[in-house]
Image (cartoon, grey):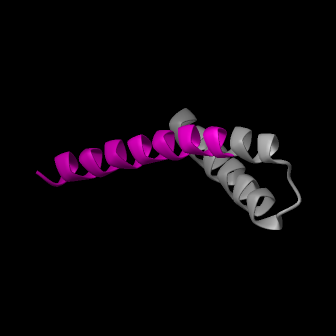
Amino acid sequence: MNEAVNFENSMKRLDEIVQKLESGKLSLEESIALYKEGSVLAESCKNALDAAKLSVENAQD
């Protein structure tokens, strides 16, 4: 369950980051920092989804 909470929190934060970046109101430095944070979060979410997919596939076998 903790992994699901972390995934949901990461997705929520990613959404916030995208909205801020799309606003065009950030400095270059702020944009770069948020981009880096978003990249880390996106990779974490991808890994969580890959693990969930593997778990479902194993359950079907």
In the rendered image, residue 60, in percent from the top left (x then y), is placed at 17, 55
Q: Residue furthest left?
A: 61
In this image, 29 relative to 61: left or right?
right
3 above or below 25? above
Which residue is more in the foreground, 6 or 45? 45
Closer to the camera, 27 or 7?
Answer: 27
Number of marks: 0
In the picture as drawn, the residue positioned furthest to the bottom comes out as 23
Query: Is residue 59 one of those drawn in magenta?
Result: yes
Residue lying furthest top: 2
Q: Quadrant of residue 36?
A: top right
Q: Residue at x 52, y 47 (%)?
A: 42
Q: Where is residue 38 shown, x and y percent of the image?
A: 62, 45
The magenta segment is 35-61
| Residue closest to the far front | 28
Which residue does the image show at 62% across and 52% down from the upper left? 11
From the viewer's perspective, tell me whether residue 12 is left or right of residue 58.
right
Horizontally, is 53 left or right of 14 in the view?
left
Residue 12 horizontal/vertical position (percent): 69, 53
Q: 6 or 1: which is nearer to us?
A: 6
Magenta stretch holds residue 10 = no
> Is most of the magenta stretch helix, strand or loop?
helix
